[in-house]
Each structure stands twice: as C-alpha cells, then as structure tokens.
Image: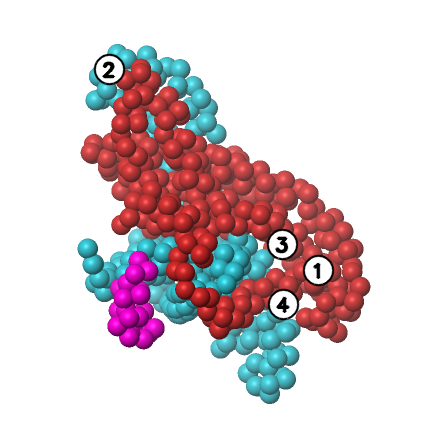
Chain colours: A cyan, B red
Amino acid sequence: MTTTTARAKKPRSAPGLQRRRPPRANKTFYWMVVPALVLFLVLHTLPTLTGIFYSFTNYAGYGEWNFVGLSNYVNLFKDDRIMDSYVFTILFAVTTTIVVNLGALFIAILLNSKIKYQTAFRGIFFIPNILSVLIVAYVFNYLLSNNLPLIGQALGIEWLSTSILTNPDLAWLGIVGVTAWQSIAFSVIIYLAGLQTVPGELYEAASLDGASPWRQFASITFPLISGYFTINMVLALKGLLQVFDQIVALTNGGPGTSTESVAMVIYRGGFQGGEFGYQMANSVVYLVVIVALALLQLRVLSRKEVDFS
Amino acid sequence: MSTPTQTTAEVTAGTPAKVRRRTSINIPLTLLVAVLSLTVLIPLYFTIVTALKSSDQLSSNGMALPTSIHLENFAKAWTLTNFPNALLISGIVTVGAVILTILTNSLVAYAIARNMHRPFFKALYYFFIAALFVPFPIIMLPVTKQMSILGLDNPVGLFLLYTVYGLSFNIFVYTAFIKSIPAELEEAAIMDGASVWTTFRKVIFPVLTPMNATVGILTCLWAWNDFMLPLVILSDPSTRTLPLVQFVFQNQFNTDYTTAFASYLMAMAPLLLIYIFAQRWVISGVMRGSVK
C-alpha cells in the first residue's frame, strides 16, 4: 500500500526537481527504488536477521527467552527427527529433480518434433503447472489410496496391492511421482524455449551425414541446450528442497515421521511445538544446505556446458 | 544468451508447425505424445467425473462415467466451504498481487537497469538477486510474527508479500529486457522536456508490455495457487483463500469424496477456464520469462 500512495504523489514534484538538476545525478531514480528497498528490508531482510538472532536463543515463540549460544545448533545434529527430515528431503529432491528433468527433456523433444496438433499437446502438458499443488496432491491421494491398489491387486503385485502412501518404505515414491507429474509441466516449457533456439539446418546436415537420432541428440541438441539444462536442474532442486504442500496433502509427514520434510519440521516445531529458537537454528542450517547444493550444482553443470560461440 | 527481443520473435514464429520444417508429420511420434498426454488428462477426467457422482457410484465404478449426474455435490461444497467468500479472497489477493507487482517491479527494474554503472544500483541488483536463494520456509516463522504485529495478517498483507518477494525474480527478468530497449527512445522524450517519471510511464512501460504479461502470468499462478503463505499469514478464518479452504475442510471431506472433488474442481475451475482460452498467450509468456 505504501508504494502506491508514495508513487501517486511523486510525479507532481519530480519534474521541478529534475529541471533544477543536471540529468547526470537524477534523484528520481533513487525515489523509484527506495520505497521498494525499504519494504524489502522490512519484509524480507529483517525477518531473516531476526530469525538468525533467535537461533541463538531458547525462544519458544512467546514469553521470555535467554541466549543459549550454539546449543540449538549442537542439538540439531543429535536430533534424529531433524536428521531424518534432511535425509528424506535431499533424497526426495535429488530423485525428483532427475525424474523431472529426464521426463521434461523427453517430452519437450517429442513436442518439438514433427507431430500433429503440436500446440494443443503443448497446451495439455502445461496444465499441471496452472493447478494448485495442494489440490493436485489431494486428488492423487485418492487415486493412490484407492485406484492404484486395485491395479496392483489385478496384476498380482503384492507391494502395489495396498496404498503406497501408508507404507513407510514406499510413501516417498508416491510423493516423488505426484511432484514430478506437476513439475514436469514447467520444465517442458523451458526446454521447449531452448530447443527452439537450435537451428533446424543442423539436423538436416546431420541426417544427410547419416547420424542416428540418438547421435543427433548427444552431439547437437544437448550441447546446444545445456544452458537450459543447468537452469532447469538448479531451479528444480532449489524448489523441491522446499517441499511442503504435496506432503501435507499426501501423507502429512507419515507414516510415522517417515516423509517429514525440513520445511514441515520447521512449520510444526515453530508454530505448534514452541520451538521457535530451535527451528530458526534449523532454518539457518537449511539455508546453508540449499545454497551449498545450488553452488555445487552450478559448478558441476557449468563445467559440462559447451560454448559454441 | 539471446536478447529478449529475439526470443519474442522466436516464440511467436515457432508456434505453428508449418513454419518450421516442411517435411511430413511423424505419425508414430504423434501417437506416442497422445498416449503420454493421457497421464495429464486422466487425473483431470477423474476429478470431473468423481465430482458428478454419488458416493455409491464412486465406490462401484471408480473411473467410469457417472450413470446419473449429482450436482448436489457442488451445492454442498459451495455452502460447506463458503465458496463465494474464498473465491473473492483469492481473487482480491491475486488481482492485487498482479497489479501491484507489474506497476512497482517494472519501475524498480527500470531504475536499476538504467543505472547499473552506479555502485548503489549495482549493489541493489545483486542484493535482490541474492535473496532468490533464501527459501521462504527460512523466514516463515519471523515474518509471520512480524506481519501480525504490523496488523498485516490479512489479504492486503498477503499481496504485499507477493509483490515484495517477487521482486528478486522479476527484476532479473525485467532488467534483461530493459537493457535491450534502445536508449534513443528515452532520449527523444527527455529532449521534449519529459521527466523521468513521464518517460517511464509514457515510453518505457508500454514497451514493457510483453514482459508485464510474463510477470503477470507467473505472479497470477503463484498467488492463486500458493498454500504456505496464506496458511501462516492469514489469521481470520473469514479471509481464507481457495487452497487454504480445501486444507481446512479436509476433515469434513474425509469420507465424503464426491463433495471434496466438487470442491477441488470449483477451486481449480476459474484459472483452468481462463487457461483454455488464453493457452497460447500463457505459454509464450512463460517461455519469454525462461530465456535469460
């Protein structure tokens, strides 16, 4: 709200200001960014800093608190529930990132080839991205609990005959599947944008030379879109490490705590468990893990990138 | 990589199949894509038919078409979740977030893009970009507390947060595009005595239209479908958004799946309907944003 009112008032005073000053030191540009910067500092930077501050306290979210030094951080590493949530979250995010990118690349290449009804199919594959993650997961919760076991029974596959969401060993696969179903949609569009930058003549030349489709993919397509591959991998992993909505709707962290993600532990402990300070320490560790994984990924992937220019 | 202007041309030109290669259509591949598209269509089909069935029909023939239509599921879901209210709140939050985001984020990006040689603006740019790496769960606890202290634990606070948190990504998208706008356009306006504000409003903002569309689409999808921010920020039960309502009423839906699916369908329908009509526009908008 502050931004709109501030913005509405300024244009009247600005022309006068501008005429008196040389265009080089134009104050208007500062007025354009300062309100946004202040809001950003108040609503993003300040909470980040207060969060880090409270991670050194035993604050419960209410009442009094004391400094406890690094003991929250030390306790995190002794807490099985926290450690399990990291194992689950990283395993989930890495698996899903790979599934999403392989699936999306495959679908994007198909959509980019000489098929009929190209635009319509592209439109269909993007639908999951316009739907709420929570609602999609509720729908799949029903399908995985009721319809999939029927298929499992009909095929005589034992592990598929009961709901995989109630099986502590398999529940995470259900979450991977539902998340992939939805996340592929966005990645397909990024890959399609990348594939459209590959000149068609390259393929024609390769076909004339007798290169197989796989050879064409490995030698032409993939090297040319490797930048898009990097972007997709980094964006997907970073997003998936924050997994929350799907789990709320599919397993609510269960069975037991086998599918509790880090975000879910922070939410539960922080809001319901009176562990504000403790969960802030968890959040800081979580931030470090996410940034470290993103940097690692960028390093590994960008080394593989080929620059043809 | 490629400049946004080029990409826009590519995206629009790339749409019809005939523009690309004139060789014949590959039938087996088309069939394969059709079969794969069923993975998207079957869950949607299932949602629709389930919402139209009675509970007995659902348990006897899960995937089949309904033998009789039960619109009372929708009536029940409508009153149970107070659908009109949730729709209104989701609408206010989404429209508010989209308008405020486009107006303010483009302005900030313009100031930054035109002053990247000045240390202050350059630092600002990297400051906002760095914030992209701070995931929301990390600031969730403190920001919730802070918003309730500020009296912003309501829909207005919510769209303010979408606008501010969107800055990081949107500045990234906008500045790349603004850099490709020739400076002569603005110089002509300034020569005519226009202020920086007027130049932005009359010259730059209209040129930004394709990027405004991209940012608008992405913000709309985010604000409409988001669950975590409304869950932690909104304190008054009468201000629940559509996804939040599904979560809150899950216990009541527990055994009544047909009502639940009617409710899901009503929550998905508004954006789904818009998408069906604006599909090409939405996809080209998202593509434009993905090329940097």
Q: Mark 4 points at which residue?
A: A142
Magenta-colored span: A199-223
Residue at mark 2: A21
Q: Which residue is drawn at 19% across and 55% down?
A: A309
Judging from the image, mark 2 belongs to the subunit labelled: A
Whether labels 4 and 1 share one chain? no
The x and y percentages for residue A224 are 28, 61
Q: Distance between the residues labelled 4 and 1?
A: 13 Å
Q: Mark 3 points at which residue?
A: B246
- Distance from disc 3 to disc 4, alpha carbons, whole Å, reads 14 Å
Residue kind at label 1, given as amino acid type? Ala
Whole-angstrom CA distance, mark 2 to mark 3, is 56 Å
Residues packed near mark 3 inside 10 Å, few (<14), some (14 to 19) or many (20 plus): many
Examine the rendering and report whether any part of residue A232 can be seen: no
**Amino acid type shown at disc 4:** Tyr
Amino acid under disc 3: Gln
Image coords of residue B45 (percent x, y): 64, 63
Q: How far apart are marks 4 and 2 (CA)?
A: 66 Å
Image point 39% across, 60% down: which residue? Answer: B21
Q: Are marks 3 and 4 in contact (CB under 8 Å)?
A: no
**How many residues crowd around disc 4 within 10 Å: few (fewer than 14), some, or many (20 or more)?**
some
Judge by depth and name the residue closer to the eye, B215 or B223: B215
- Is residue A111 located in the magenta-colored stretch of the structure? no
Horizontal side of residue B261 vs A127, given as left or right: right
Please tell me which of labels 4 and 2 falls first in the chain.
2
Q: Which of the 4 quarters of the picture holds residue A159? A: bottom right
Same subunit, labels 2 and 1: the answer reads no
Classify mark 1: residues with Cα within 10 Å, few (<14), some (14-19) or many (20+): many
Using residue A87 as the reference point, say whether residue B283 is left or right of it: right
Label for residue B51? 1
- Does residue A219 belong to the magenta stretch? yes
